[in-house]
Image (tube, rainbow, N blue to C red):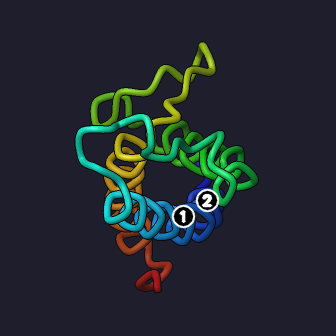
Protein backbone atom coordinates (compact mmCIF):
# COMPACT_ATOMS: atom_id res chain seq x y z
CA UNK A 1 0.00 0.00 0.00
CA UNK A 2 1.32 3.41 -0.96
CA UNK A 3 -0.39 5.89 1.33
CA UNK A 4 1.04 8.86 -0.56
CA UNK A 5 -0.90 7.68 -3.64
CA UNK A 6 -4.03 7.48 -1.49
CA UNK A 7 -3.48 11.02 -0.21
CA UNK A 8 -3.09 12.40 -3.74
CA UNK A 9 -6.12 10.48 -4.99
CA UNK A 10 -8.13 11.75 -2.02
CA UNK A 11 -7.20 15.35 -2.83
CA UNK A 12 -8.33 14.84 -6.45
CA UNK A 13 -11.53 12.93 -5.74
CA UNK A 14 -13.11 15.06 -3.02
CA UNK A 15 -13.52 18.30 -5.04
CA UNK A 16 -14.80 16.34 -8.03
CA UNK A 17 -17.38 14.61 -5.83
CA UNK A 18 -18.47 18.00 -4.47
CA UNK A 19 -18.77 19.33 -8.03
CA UNK A 20 -20.87 16.31 -9.02
CA UNK A 21 -23.18 16.88 -6.04
CA UNK A 22 -23.70 20.51 -7.03
CA UNK A 23 -24.49 19.58 -10.64
CA UNK A 24 -26.88 16.86 -9.49
CA UNK A 25 -28.69 19.25 -7.15
CA UNK A 26 -29.03 21.85 -9.90
CA UNK A 27 -30.31 19.24 -12.34
CA UNK A 28 -32.87 17.95 -9.84
CA UNK A 29 -34.15 21.48 -9.24
CA UNK A 30 -34.57 22.10 -12.98
CA UNK A 31 -35.85 18.66 -13.93
CA UNK A 32 -39.19 17.01 -13.43
CA UNK A 33 -38.47 14.20 -10.94
CA UNK A 34 -40.20 11.67 -13.20
CA UNK A 35 -37.95 12.38 -16.18
CA UNK A 36 -34.75 10.60 -15.18
CA UNK A 37 -33.29 11.04 -18.68
CA UNK A 38 -32.60 14.69 -17.88
CA UNK A 39 -30.33 13.92 -14.91
CA UNK A 40 -26.71 14.30 -16.08
CA UNK A 41 -24.39 11.33 -16.25
CA UNK A 42 -20.76 11.52 -15.28
CA UNK A 43 -19.15 10.81 -18.65
CA UNK A 44 -21.45 12.79 -20.94
CA UNK A 45 -22.46 15.87 -18.94
CA UNK A 46 -20.78 18.93 -20.41
CA UNK A 47 -19.46 20.12 -17.03
CA UNK A 48 -18.30 16.69 -15.85
CA UNK A 49 -17.03 14.95 -18.98
CA UNK A 50 -13.51 16.31 -18.59
CA UNK A 51 -13.41 15.19 -14.97
CA UNK A 52 -14.73 11.66 -15.59
CA UNK A 53 -11.35 9.98 -16.03
CA UNK A 54 -9.73 11.90 -13.18
CA UNK A 55 -12.68 11.00 -10.93
CA UNK A 56 -12.43 7.28 -11.66
CA UNK A 57 -8.62 7.18 -11.68
CA UNK A 58 -8.60 8.69 -8.20
CA UNK A 59 -11.43 6.40 -7.03
CA UNK A 60 -9.71 3.29 -8.38
CA UNK A 61 -6.37 4.31 -6.87
CA UNK A 62 -7.94 4.51 -3.42
CA UNK A 63 -9.82 1.28 -4.03
CA UNK A 64 -6.76 -0.67 -5.12
CA UNK A 65 -4.22 0.80 -2.69
CA UNK A 66 -6.43 0.14 0.34
CA UNK A 67 -7.84 -3.20 -0.88
CA UNK A 68 -11.45 -2.10 -0.42
CA UNK A 69 -13.23 -4.97 -2.17
CA UNK A 70 -15.38 -5.52 0.94
CA UNK A 71 -16.24 -1.83 1.34
CA UNK A 72 -17.19 -0.79 -2.18
CA UNK A 73 -18.24 -3.02 -5.05
CA UNK A 74 -16.19 -1.95 -8.06
CA UNK A 75 -15.16 -4.25 -10.86
CA UNK A 76 -11.65 -2.87 -11.20
CA UNK A 77 -10.32 -5.81 -13.15
CA UNK A 78 -12.78 -5.30 -15.99
CA UNK A 79 -12.46 -1.54 -16.01
CA UNK A 80 -16.19 -1.28 -15.30
CA UNK A 81 -17.26 2.10 -13.98
CA UNK A 82 -20.66 3.61 -13.51
CA UNK A 83 -21.55 6.87 -15.19
CA UNK A 84 -24.64 7.31 -13.00
CA UNK A 85 -24.09 10.51 -11.08
CA UNK A 86 -25.89 9.51 -7.88
CA UNK A 87 -24.18 6.11 -7.72
CA UNK A 88 -20.79 7.69 -8.42
CA UNK A 89 -21.28 10.14 -5.56
CA UNK A 90 -22.20 7.32 -3.16
CA UNK A 91 -19.13 5.31 -4.19
CA UNK A 92 -16.89 8.36 -3.81
CA UNK A 93 -18.33 9.05 -0.35
CA UNK A 94 -17.44 5.55 0.84
CA UNK A 95 -13.95 5.66 -0.65
CA UNK A 96 -13.22 9.11 0.75
CA UNK A 97 -14.42 8.15 4.22
CA UNK A 98 -12.13 5.12 4.38
CA UNK A 99 -9.18 6.93 2.78
CA UNK A 100 -9.46 9.79 5.25
CA UNK A 101 -9.38 7.34 8.16
CA UNK A 102 -6.25 5.63 6.77
CA UNK A 103 -4.51 8.95 6.13
CA UNK A 104 -5.29 10.24 9.63
CA UNK A 105 -4.31 6.95 11.28
CA UNK A 106 -0.99 6.87 9.41
CA UNK A 107 0.04 10.16 10.95
CA UNK A 108 -0.27 12.29 7.85
CA UNK A 109 -2.37 14.70 9.88
CA UNK A 110 -5.96 15.47 9.24
CA UNK A 111 -6.93 15.90 5.62
CA UNK A 112 -8.48 19.21 4.76
Residue 10, label in figure: 1
Q: Which sits in the foreground, 111 or 42? A: 42
In the picture, measured across the screen, residue 15 lies left or right of residue 71, that is: right
On the image, the x and y values in percent for residue 40 come to 50, 46
Residue lying farthest to the right in this orientation = 50
On the image, the x and y values in percent for residue 95 come to 39, 51
Q: Say if 95 sits above or below 41 in the image.
A: below
**Residue hosting label 2:** 9
On the image, the x and y values in percent for residue 44 come to 65, 40
On the image, the x and y values in percent for residue 45 come to 62, 48
Q: Which sits in the foreground, 28 or 11? A: 28
Q: Which sits in the foreground, 17 or 101? A: 17
Distance (Cα) linking label 2 and label 1:
4 Å
**Identity of the residue drawn at 55% across and 61% down:** 13
Q: Say if 42 sits above or below 19 in the image.
A: above
Q: Dot 2 surroundings within 10 Å: few (below 14), some, or many (20 or more)?
A: many
Residue lying farthest to the top in this orientation = 78
- Do the CB atoms of the residues marked 2 and 1 lie less than 8 Å apart? yes
Residue 112, label in figure: none
Question: How many numbered dots are placed on residues in this image?
Answer: 2
**Identity of the residue drawn at 54% across and 28% down:** 81
- Helix, strand or loop at mark 2: helix
Q: Dot 1 surroundings within 10 Å: few (below 14), some, or many (20 or more)?
A: many
Residue lying farthest to the left in this orientation = 34
**Identity of the residue drawn at 52% across and 35% down:** 83
- Helix, strand or loop at mark 1: helix
**Identity of the residue drawn at 35% across and 27% down:** 73
In the picture, measured across the screen, residue 32 lies left or right of residue 9, that is: left
Amino acid sequence: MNLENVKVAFSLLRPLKDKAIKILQEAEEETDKEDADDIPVLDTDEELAGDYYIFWSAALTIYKELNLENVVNLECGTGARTNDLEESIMIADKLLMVAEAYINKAGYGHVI
